[in-house]
C-alpha cells in the first residue's frame, strides 16, 4: 500500500549491513577523519593510516594530550570577547543597547560596532578552532552539544552571552559527565534567559525551560511523562535565575532566589518532592541525567550524528547500557560507539550528508587555505540556511540528509565550491581527499580544464557526504 | 452552520466512490490549465496565540483570564477589530480587513491536531505529515498532494520559500526549495559559467544519491529565474511605485506572487514564519505578538493584491502547530496549549465568518482546564481544500490524509 511505499528503500539502505566488511587502511582513515574530524586536511589521511585508526581515536578522546599550535592560540588570544568574563561582555552590550532610540549617527555606529564585534568574535573563535584545531573531536562535539543545548543569539541578551555559554557551559564538558554538562547549561544565564526560567517564580510560573529540559535535553518526547510533570518540574526550578546587575558587576552567573521559589511540595514522575529549595532542581537534574529514557534518547542522537541517519538499534542499545553503567560518562559512551563494528563498517562510510557547517568547514580544511575570512564564512553559512548561533528554536540544527538535501541547497553548495575552487590548487585538494573521491569524479575532473578541477572536487557528490 | 460530509461518501463503498473520482478527473481535464488552482500554505512555527488573533472579546472570561494581554473591546483604545459582535481581530491584522469585508477571509477557531502533544517539534511534524501521533511517516502531505494532482508535474509545481526544505514538502515527488530574499531567484555560478555547468552536469548525471536532486535544481532554477525575470514582474513593480517592501515576509510574498503569475506550472507553495513562541512579554495590541502579526498581515495583503485575478483561483491557509494557554502566565506571556484558529483566504472562500465549534472559555469548557479543546481536526480543513478547491479525486484523498476522521468538515468554500 502507498503509505509504506518507502519501506523497500529503507530495507535496501539496511541491506549492506548484513554482508559488509570493516573498513581498512586509507579508507578507514578517511572515514574517521570524516566523522571524528571535519574532514581531512592535506596529509591527514596518510598520517592517520600510518599511525593506525585506533590510536587516532584514542588520542582524539583525550584532547588535552594534543598540543594546540602556537599560531592558533595566539589568534584565539587576540579575541577580546573570548578572553573576558560573561558579565563584562554583557556590560558592554547593555551599555550600547541602552543608548537612546533617536540617537545620532555616532551612537548608532558605536552600537553596530560593539554588537558586531561580539557576534563576529564568537563566530571567528568557533570557525578558527573548527578548521585549525588538531583536537578535532572536541570541535565536532562542540557542534553536537551546542545544538543539543541550543540557544539563539537573536534573542536579547543571548547575543552577549553565547560566547560564554559555549566556552563555560559546553566546551569543558563535551567529553565529561553528562550531569555536569546538563547542570552547567541549566545554570548559565544564556539558557536561563533564552528559555525564560530566569523570570519564572512561584506565583508566576513559566514552563518553557522545564518542558524543553525533559523533551529535548534529556528524556525526549513521548516518554510517558505528562503535562503535570512538566508543570511540577517548572515549579521545582522556580528561583533558578541570575541577577543582571550582579552578573555585570561581579560576574555572578547564577543565583538561586528563595523568594521566587515555590515552597509547596510537588508530585513529579510519580515521586513526592518535599520542599528543599535549590536542591529540588539539582535532584531533578540528577534523576534526568541518569534516566534510562535519557540514556536512549542521547545515545540515539549521538549514533545518528556519528553513524547514520537511521542508526543501528543494537548499537544504540549498547550505548544506552554503557551510559547507565558509566553513570552518563560521555567519553565512555563514545568509546562504545567508535569501537563498534557498526561504526567501522564500510556500508556507513559516506552515509551521512554534510550539514552546511560541516560542508563549509571541511571545504576550508581540504583546500588547505585554512580559516582566513570568518565574516565571509558566516555569510555563506547564513545563505546555506545554517547561520552560526542563529537557530531560533531550542531543538538546534538537525544533522540528517532529509533536513538539508534539496535542489536549491545543492546548487548553492556547488556555487560555493566554484568560488572556493578558484583559490585552491587542485593538487592540494586531491592530496587532502585522496581515496574519498570516487573514480568517476576523478575521471570527469581529469577530462576538464585544469582551472575547473578544484571546483569539481569540492562540489562533487563525494564531497557532499561524509 | 452548513456542514458537509464528504467522508460518508467515501465510506459508502467503491460503487459510489468511483464515479465521484472519475467526475473530478474529468472536470480537471476539461479545465483549460490543470495548474490554475493554487494553494499556498503559511505555517506559523512556535504556536501563535490564536486567542489574541481572533479574540473572543465578547466573552467576559477572556479579559479575566488575561489581565494584561487581553485585547480591549472594539472601539476602545487599542481595541480589537469587530468581526461578528463576539470575536475581534487583532488590530495589527487591520490590512486583512478588506478581505474580511469582501468575504474572502474566514477563520476556523478551536481547530488543530487531535494529538495532545505540546511539543512544538512533534506537533509540527504531525501537522506537516498529516499523520498525528505517527512519527515514521516518510513524507509530507503537500508532497503527497503534488504527486496526486492531475496534470503533468515539473519540479517547480511545488515550491517552498525558506532556508531548508520543509517536512511538509519532503518526499518522493519533486519539489523545489528557494532561499528567502532576492538571492532565491538569482542564477548561480552554474548558470553563469556554461563550461562549469556542463562539467557539473556530467559529474552528477548518473549519481544515484544526488543526480535527481541536482537535475531538479538545475531545471527548477532556470524556471524560477525565468519567472522572476519576466517583463511582467517589472511592470508590476512599477505599478506599485517601486516602493521597497519591509523586509521579510512581505518581500517574499511579493516575490511569490510574481513567480506564481509568471510560471503557470507552479501550483503549491509553502512559507514558514517563526517567532510565535511567546512565553513572556507577549503584549496586547502592541508588543511582541503585534510585531510579528503586522508583517504577516501586510504580506498576506500584498500576496492577495499582487496575485491579481489569480487570487480568485487561490486558497491560502495559515496554520500553527497548536495554540497557547487561555490564561496568561506569570510573565505576561502564554504557555503551550492545544486548539488554535486556522485562517483561510482566497477567491473561493465563503468568508466573513468565524467557523468551527466554539465552546467558550469557562473552566469546564477548557481542555485540561488550560487551553482550547480541538473541535475541528486540521486534516478535515485541508482535505476540504484538496477536494473542493484542487479537485483531488476522492480515492487520492484518503492516501494524502490517511486516517482522516469521519466527522463532518467545516464547509468554507464556495461551490465552483
Image: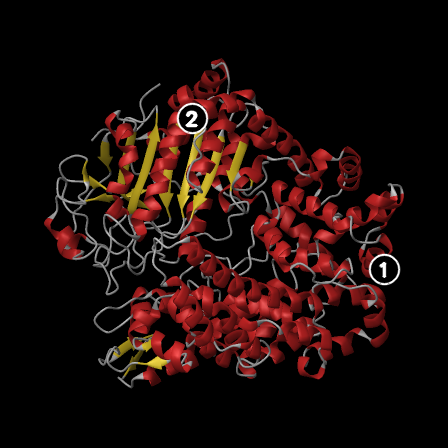
Residue A431 image label = 1
Residue closest to the eye, B111 or B283: B283
Classify mark 1: helix, strand or loop: helix
Discs 2 and 1 share one subunit: no
Picture coordinates of residue A100 (x, y %)? 34, 59
Q: Is residue A216 visible?
A: no
Q: Is residue B24 visible?
A: yes
Q: Is residue A377 left or right of residue B316?
A: right
Q: State the CA–CA distance, disc 2 to disc 1.
A: 56 Å
**Which residue shows up at 62% across the image and 80% down it?**
A332
Residue B35 image label = none
Task: Pick the quarter of the image with the N terminus of chain A.
Answer: top right
Picture coordinates of residue A399 (x, y %)? 59, 58
Picture coordinates of residue B108 (x, y %)? 28, 38
**Which residue shows up at 41% across the image and 60% down it?**
A155
Picture coordinates of residue B196 (x, y %)? 78, 38
Of all chains, the one bearing label 1 is A
Task: Pick the quarter of the image with the C terminus of chain A.
Answer: bottom right
Toward which corner of the image does residue A186 lie, by quadrant? bottom left
Q: Is residue B255 left or right of residue A206?
A: right
**Which residue shows up at 77% across the image and 78% down it?**
A55
Toward which corner of the image does residue A140 lie, by quadrant? bottom right
Residue closest to the eye, B332 or A300: B332
Toward which corner of the image does residue A249 lie, by quadrant? bottom left
Q: Is residue B275 left or right of residue A76?
A: left
Q: Answer above or below: position of B278 versus B396.
A: below
Of all chains, the one bearing label 2 is B
Q: Answer above or below: position of A203 versus B91.
A: below
Residue at far left of view: B60
Q: Which residue is mark 2?
A: B241
Amino acid at each position: 500500500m502507498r503509505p509504506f511505499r518507502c519501506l523497500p528503500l529503507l530495507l535496501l539502505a539496511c541491506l549492506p549491513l548484513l554482508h559488509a566488511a570493516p573498513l581498512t587502511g586509507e579508507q578507514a582513515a578517511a572515514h574517521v577523519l570524516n566523522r571524528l574530524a571535519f574532514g581531512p586536511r592535506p596529509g591527514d589521511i596518510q598520517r592517520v593510516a600510518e599511525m593506525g585508526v585506533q590510536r587516532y581515536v584514542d588520542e582524539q578522546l583525550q584532547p588535552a594530550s594534543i598540543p594546540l599550535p602556537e599560531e592558533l592560540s595566539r589568534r584565539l588570544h587576540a579575541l577580546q570577547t573570548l578572553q573576558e568574563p560573561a558579565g563584562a561582555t554583557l556590560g558592554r552590550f547593555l551599555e550600547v543597547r541602552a543608548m537612546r532610540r533617536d540617537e545620532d549617527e555616532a551612537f548608532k555606529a558605536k552600537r553596530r560596532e560593539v554588537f558586531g564585534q561580539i557576534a563576529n568574535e564568537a563566530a571567528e573563535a568557533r570557525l578558527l578552532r573548527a578548521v585549525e584545531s588538531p583536537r578535532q573531536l572536541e570541535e565536532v562535539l562542540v557542534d553536537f552539544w551546542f545544538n543539543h543545548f541550543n540557544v539563539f543569539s537573536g534573542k536579547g541578551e543571548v547575543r552577549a552571552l553565547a560566547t560564554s555559554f559555549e566556552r563555560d557551559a559546553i566546551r569543558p564538558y563535551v567529553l565529561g559527565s553528562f550531569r555536569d554538562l546538563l547542570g552547567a547549561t541549566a545554570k548559565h544565564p544564556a539558557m536561563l534567559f533564552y528559555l525564560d526560567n530566569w523570570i519564572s517564580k512561584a506565583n508566576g510560573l513559566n514552563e518553557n525551560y522545564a518542558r524543553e529540559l525533559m523533551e529535548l535535553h534529556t528524556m525526549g518526547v513521548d516518554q510517558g511523562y505528562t503535562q503535570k510533570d512538566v508543570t511540577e518540574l517548572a515549579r521545582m526550578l522556580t528561583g533558578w535565575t541570575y541577577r543582571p546587575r550582579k552578573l555585570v558587576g561581579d560576574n555572578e552567573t547564577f543565583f538561586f532566589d528563595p523568594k521566587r521559589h515555590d515552597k509547596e511540595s510537588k508530585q513529579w514522575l510519580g515521586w513526592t518532592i518535599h520542599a528543599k529549595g535549590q536542591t529540588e532542581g539539582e535532584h531533578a537534574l540528577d534523576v534526568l541525567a541518569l534516566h534510562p529514557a535519557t540514556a536512549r534518547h542521547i545515545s540515539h542522537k549521538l549514533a545518528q550524528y556519528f553513524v547514520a541517519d537511521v542508526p543501528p538499534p543494537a548499537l544504540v542499545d549498547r550505548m544506552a547500557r554503557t551510559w547507565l553503567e558509566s553513570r552518563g560518562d560521555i567519553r565512555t559512551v563514545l568509546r562504545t560507539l567508535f569501537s563498534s563494528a557498526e561504526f567501522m563498517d564500510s556500508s556507513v562510510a559516506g552515509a551521512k550528508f554534510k550539514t552546511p557547517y560541516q560542508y563549509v568547514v571541511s571545504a576550508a580544511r581540504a583546500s588547505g587555505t585554512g580559516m582566513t575570512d570568518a565574516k565571509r564564512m558566516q555569510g555563506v553559512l547564513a545563505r546555506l540556511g545554517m547561520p552560526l548561533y542563529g537557530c531560533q528554536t531550542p531543538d538546534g540544527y538537525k544533522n540528517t540528509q532529509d533536513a538539508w538535501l534539496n535542489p536549491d541547497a545543492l546548487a548553492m553548495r556547488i556555487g560555493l565550491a566554484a568560488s572556493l575552487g578558484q583559490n585552491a590548487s587542485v593538487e592540494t585538494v586531491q592530496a587532502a581527499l585522496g581515496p574519498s573521491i570516487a573514480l568517476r569524479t576523478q575521471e570527469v575532473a581529469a577530462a576538464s580544464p585544469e582551472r575547473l578541477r578544484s571546483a569539481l572536487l569540492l562540489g562533487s557528490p563525494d564531497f557532499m557526504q561524509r | 452552520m452548513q456542514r458537509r460530509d464528504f467522508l460518508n461518501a467515501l465510506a459508502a463503498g467503491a460503487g459510489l466512490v468511483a464515479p465521484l473520482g472519475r467526475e473530478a478527473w474529468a472536470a480537471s481535464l476539461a479545465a483549460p490549465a490543470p495548474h490554475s488552482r493554487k494553494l499556498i500554505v503559511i505555517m506559523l512555527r512556535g504556536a501563535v496565540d490564536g486567542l489574541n488573533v481572533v479574540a473572543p472579546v465578547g466573552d467576559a472570561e477572556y479579559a479575566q483570564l488575561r489581565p494584561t494581554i487581553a485585547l480591549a473591546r472594539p472601539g476602545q483604545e487599542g481595541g480589537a477589530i469587530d468581526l461578528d459582535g463576539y470575536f475581534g481581530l487583532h488590530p495589527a491584522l487591520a490590512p486583512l480587513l478588506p478581505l474580511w469585508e469582501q468575504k474572502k477571509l474566514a477563520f476556523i477557531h478551536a481547530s488543530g491536531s487531535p494529538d495532545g502533544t505540546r511539543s512544538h517539534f512533534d506537533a509540527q511534524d504531525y501537522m506537516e505529515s498529516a499523520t498525528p501521533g505517527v512519527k515514521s511517516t516518510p513524507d509530507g502531505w503537500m508532497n503527497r498532494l503534488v504527486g496526486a494532482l492531475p496534470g503533468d508535474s515539473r519540479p517547480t509545481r511545488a515550491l517552498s520559500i525558506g532556508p531548508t526544505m520543509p517536512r511538509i514538502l519532503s518526499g518522493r515527488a519533486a519539489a523545489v526549495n528557494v532561499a528567502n530574499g532576492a538571492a532565491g531567484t538569482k542564477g548561480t555560478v552554474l548558470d553563469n559559467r556554461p563550461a562549469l555547468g556542463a562539467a557539473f552536469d556530467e559529474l552528477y548525471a548518473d549519481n544515484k544519491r544526488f543526480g535527481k536532486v541536482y537535475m531538479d535544481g538545475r531545471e527548477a532554477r532556470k524556471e524560477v529565474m525565468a519567472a522572476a525575470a519576466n517583463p511582467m514582474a517589472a511592470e508590476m513593480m512599477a505599478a506599485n511605485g517601486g516602493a521597497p517592501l519591509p523586509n521579510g515576509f512581505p518581500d517574499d510574498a511579493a516575490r511569490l506572487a510574481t513567480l506564481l503569475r509568471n510560471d503557470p506550472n507552479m501550483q503549491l507553495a509553502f512559507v514558514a514564519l517563526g517567532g510565535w513562541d511567546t512565553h513572556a512579554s507577549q503584549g496586547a495590541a502592541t508588543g511582541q505578538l503585534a510585531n510579528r502579526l503586522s508583517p504577516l498581515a501586510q504580506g498576506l495583503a500584498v500576496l492577495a493584491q499582487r496575485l491579481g485575478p489569480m487570487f480568485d483561483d487561490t486558497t491560502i491557509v495559515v496554520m500553527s502547530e497548536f495554540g497557547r494557554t487561555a490564561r496568561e502566565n506569570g510573565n505576561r506571556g502564554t504557555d503551550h496549549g492545544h486548539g488554535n484558529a486556522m485562517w483561510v483566504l482566497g477567491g473561493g472562500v465563503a468568508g466573513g465568518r468565524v467557523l468551527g465549534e466554539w465552546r467558550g472559555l469557562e473552566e469546564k469548557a477548557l481542555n485540561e482546564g488550560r487551553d482550547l479543546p480541538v473541535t475541528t481536526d486540521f486534516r478535515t480543513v485541508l482535505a476540504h481544500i484538496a477536494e473542493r478547491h484542487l479537485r483531488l479525486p476522492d480515492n487520492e484523498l484518503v492516501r494524502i490524509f490517511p486516517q482522516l476522521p469521519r466527522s463532518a468538515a467545516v464547509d468554507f468554500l464556495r461551490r465552483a
